[in-house]
Image (cartoon, rainbow, N blue to C red):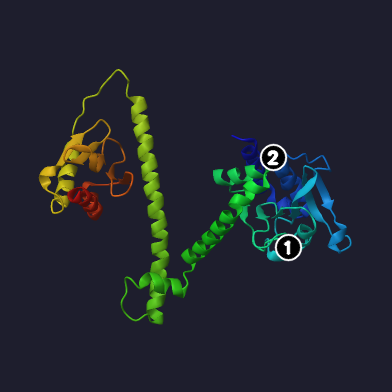
Amino acid sequence: MSTIEESLRAIAERVKSHSSTMATEEAVKTAVVLPFLRALGYDVFDPSEVVPEFTADAVGKKGEKVDYAIKIDNEIRILIECKPISVTLEKKHLDQLYRYFSVTNAKFAILTNGRTFNFYTDLDAPNKLDAKPFFVFDVADFNAGIVSELKKFEKASFDVGAILATAERLKYTSGVKQVLSKLIEDPSDEFVRMVSSGVYEGRMTQQVRETFTGIVRSAFREVIMDTVKSRLSNALADTEEVIEKIDTPVDEEPDIVTTDEEREGFMIVKAIVRDTIKATRVTMRDQKTYCGILIDNNNRKPLARLWFNRSVKYIGLFDGEVEERLIVESLDKIYDYSERLRATARKYAEA
């Protein structure tokens, strides 16, 4: 685990346990921001590197300051403005950062309330702070991707070009994710009309639109859940396969036993595709960890795999570029994938 990850976990625990005591900017600075800067390799005790209460005469507002300015190679590169943890970060809180950004050599600005960190730069117009952040993260809910982006801001590896190279992608990806999240929770009339046009041919009355709004919302969530379940199934199957290999002694070659369930599964698959490809071309070749169903008894022509030698059973499908494993609670579940099995068989029949 890297120093950044360890520090973020410590900060996250502090935020979760003591957020009620971070009601002031000073509390946020001490408990979150300074430890965060230390994690990135900055010397928070060196006022020539981490400059507190930074002022610039050119701003034109006497006494106006930003909470911190970070100097790298004696040049101001990052400006930081802090708010109490109870404050919801909004565009109006950018005023000071906006003015200071234009009169310094700063390339990035951070607005934070101790929990949410918003990173800004000048993607829209040179030397003019963007109104929207290109990178946002919640310190109490971070992942490996966030840590990877934060490492670009480390003192030892700080590279303006490297950060800007991905900043635009991050900005628009974040924006698209927000739009999609909103559509999931509250589908717009236009979106409902668009996705329902292919399944409903009648007149889109107010009542119909209200009905389809609920349907679209549920369908959207189910698509996401199905994707998650599929990935979990594949991951779990891979894990069980590794465990089986570890548990099997190297000097022992267990006999391959084809079970009645595997034979029945093979017959179901064969029956499903018989109208697509000649039944005589569909063969079974059992392995130690799965039962393979092949075309022409050729390993390069996999039709399906029955991963039945485990507590959780799967069927492996090959209609995509790689095998996708899906849970089958019973043999009848195989029929749910009839079209996908036929699509795979069709590839070999037409070859």
Q: Amino acid at mark 2?
A: Ala
User: Circle 2 — which element?
Assistant: helix
**On the rendered structure, is 93 left or right of 199?**
right
Q: Nearer the viewer, residue 314 or 151?
A: 151
Residue 274, image x, y percentages = 13, 51
Quick one: label 1 or label 2, which is nearer the N terminus? 2
Residue 205, image x, y percentages = 38, 82
Decide: few, some or many residues near mark 1? Use Cα within 10 Å; few <14, some 14-19, many ≥20.
some
| Residue at mark 1 | 93
Q: Are marks 1 and 2 in contact (CB under 8 Å)?
A: no
Q: Nearer the viewer, residue 151 or 29?
A: 151
| Residue at mark 2 | 39
Q: Is residue 139 visible?
A: no
Q: Amino acid at mark 1?
A: His
Q: Residue at x 30, y 17 (%)?
A: 251
Q: Nearer the viewer, residue 210 or 62?
A: 62
Where is residue 71, by image quadrant? top right
From this viewpoint, which residue is outermost toward the top? 251
Q: Residue at x 40, y 74 (%)?
A: 193
The image's mark for residue 140 is none
Q: Nearer the viewer, residue 109 or 6?
A: 109
Where is residue 174, by image quadrant? bottom right
Q: Residue at x 69, y 48 (%)?
A: 18
Where is residue 129, by image quadrant? bottom right
Residue 98, image x, y percentages = 75, 61
Residue 103, image x, y percentages = 80, 58
